[in-house]
Amino acid sequence: MNDCIAVNIQDMLKAIGEEKLSKLLSDFSCPLNREVEDFVRNKSIDFAQRKLSITYLVMKRTNEDKNILVGIYTLSHKAIEITNSNISNTTRKKLLRYAALDKDTNKYNISAFLIAQFGKNNAVPKKYSITGNELMDLTFELLKHVQYCVGGGVVYLDCENVVKVLDFYQNGCNRFKIFGERESDVDQKRYLQLLRFF
């Protein structure tokens, strides 16, 4: 992982221009999650320009001294509601550091970091690929820096209810916990919501 760097898409846009950046992103492949692939290829630049979310391009240097895109993560900041009855006592205690319980709704309203998109580039030769845990470590490196600058301590994400995906997010390295679910406005697909304190 030491040979990987995460580059803010806005910096890449300034450095190489929109045409070259679009070409770089058009080669991103994530067949297990076409939503991530579509976002990277078609929406990530626009979302960054409108300040809706910022995508980080994880680059790795090849033996030929060329930088290749091995993965991405997209971050944003969003208010969320967490229902009190959906969480453990330990989670409740931790949440109280960041939010108060609204007794009328039985929910915590909290401002949290959102990992909006997260994925590896499957178009990369295996010898240059990055693991999901390495990609998550890079994500948290940045989140900890942002936390140092502005505070906060809760991050969340949405994911499909797929055993392999849940196992990854809930493993000993990543330690996310389910706190709810939501339905997509676009395709009415149900997503689990997971959070982590850091």
Image (cartoon, rainbow, N blue to C red):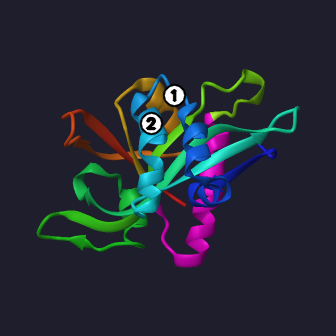
The residue closer to the viewer here, 107 or 164, is: 164
Classify mark 2: helix, strand or loop: helix
The magenta region covers 132-154
Q: Is residue 109 above or below residue 168?
A: below
Q: List the residue tagged with mark 2.
A: 36
Q: What is the chief secondary structure element of the magenta stretch?
A: helix
Q: Is residue 125 left or right of residue 50?
A: right
- For the N terminus, the image quarter is top right
What kind of residue is marked 2? Answer: Val
Task: Report if residue 155 is visible in the image.
Answer: no
Q: Is residue 136 above or below residue 92?
A: above
Q: Residue furthest left?
A: 104
Task: Report if residue 166 is visible in the image.
Answer: yes
Residue at horizontal 59%, vertical 34%?
120
Q: Quarter of the image holding residue 119?
A: top right
The answer to the question of whether label 2 and label 1 lie on touching residues, with beta carbons closer than 8 A, is yes
Classify mark 1: helix, strand or loop: loop
What kind of residue is marked 1? Answer: Cys
List x then y, in percent, for residue 155.
46, 57
Give me the disc on residue 110. Answer: none
Q: Is residue 30 above or below residue 175?
A: above
Residue at horizontal 63%, vertical 55%?
12
The residue closer to the viewer here, 19 or 147, is: 19
Q: List the residue tagged with mark 1.
A: 30
Look at the image and say whether residue 141 sits in the magenta stretch.
Answer: yes
- Answer few, some or many: residues within 10 Å of disc 1's Cα (few below 14, many 20 plus, some between 14 and 19): some
